[in-house]
Image (cartoon, helix red, strand yellow):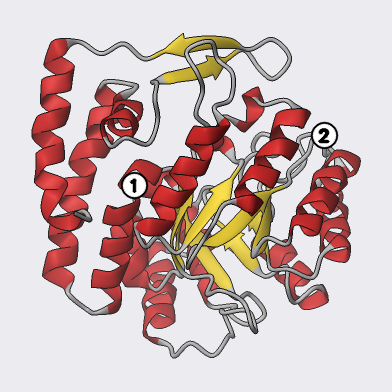
Amino acid sequence: MRNLTRRECLGALVAAALAPRLDGAEPSGGKPLRGAFMILATPFTDAGEVDWDDLTKEARFVDQCGAHGMVWPQGSSSVANLTKAERLRGMEVLAASARRTSALVLGVQGHDTAEMLEYARRAEALAPDAIIAMPPSAAKNLDDYREYFRALGQVTKRPVFVQTSGGVRDLAPTVDLMVDLAREFPHVAYIKEESAPLLERMAAELTRRPPLKGVFGASYADGWLFEMRLGLDGVMTGMAMYADLMARMWELHVRGEAEALRDAYSRFLLMRNMNEQVPGSDLYVMQKRGIFKTTTTRTGGAAAWKPRRATLTREAIAEIEYRFAALKPYLRG
């Protein structure tokens, strides 16, 4: 892919935003794959075990908030600290959870093609609305990526999201590769884009619909306001504690209420900044909103994990509460 100049990049994004949607981004007979898709965090007990009841509660919260989709397990789900048995059980738990409108997207990434296919076949049996996979970390080159996603395209006919990060360091799937996959497998046509150079890649992807059907931002929605206004199809990110706020922002965007959207997004960024200053703030909000019982996470990897509880000072909690109060006009009751 030829490197675009900054002017060409922005021009392509603007053209994509203004162009009519003719790409069939919504799968025939399925739930719409556009809007705010929340990557579910994995809840843990104080001892560090997965809390399956809270995972179900989180999924129901996201659905009741009007979010357009839920995704599990990805990076924001602590997937690197989950065992194979936990990943398989979690998919079953979520497939069994009552959902009204939110699309369920199950993550099937693996170290290599064989591991990915084990998860993919189990996901396929559970009939989610879509599937997502990071590239394989065992790959040597882009041809390995191609064969991995081709294998995924052959095992399912459901919509497939290609996540551009999470594979080999400094090796993202090229736009041309993802377009080739979409041409060969029309259901492997959705992208979760979070690789540099971000705007350049998004510009190229948006101008190649079809065969691509959906381009989503990510990265904790840090750039979502700009991405919405540039014509992306949604965001896929780990912000389940703000599912109602995220759904509301998409609604404001669709209705063209630009000033209200800017205001809501600005208030959201206050909370994002808080979590960067005080790690664990998001888990505190999860607990505050009655979704999780604890603020415990895991460290150390799937084979040797250890529990870690987020402990916040009284001053930090006061600041979270002060900032959270600003969100209330945009939250559900």
State the image coordinates of residue 19 (x, y, percent, origin top left): 43, 88
For the C terminus, the quadrant is bottom left
Disc 2 on helix, strand or loop? loop
- The quarter of the displayed image where residue 74 is located: top right
Q: Which residue is mark 2?
A: 138
Residue extending farthest right:
114
Position above or below: 257 against 144 = below
Looking at the picture, tell me which residue is in the foreground, 27 or 244.
244
The structure residue drawn at horizontal position 48% and vertical position 87%, both measured from the top left corner, is 21
Position above or below: 293 against 171 = above
Three-letter amino acid code of the residue under disc 2: Ala
The structure residue drawn at horizontal position 39% and vertical position 25%, both measured from the top left corner, is 293
State the image coordinates of residue 202 (x, y, percent, origin top left): 50, 63
**Of callouts 2 and 1, which one flags the residue occurring earlier in the amino acid sequence?**
2
**Number of the label disc, if any, that sits on residue 222:** 1
Position above or below: 6 against 121 = below
* Left/right of residue 185 with respect to residue 2 in the rendered view: right
Looking at the picture, tell me which residue is in the foreground, 298 or 167.
298
> Can residue 261 be spotted in the picture?
yes
> What's the CA distance linking mark 2 and mark 1?
29 Å
Q: Residues within 10 Å of mark 2 (few under 14, many from 20)?
A: some
For the N terminus, the quadrant is bottom right
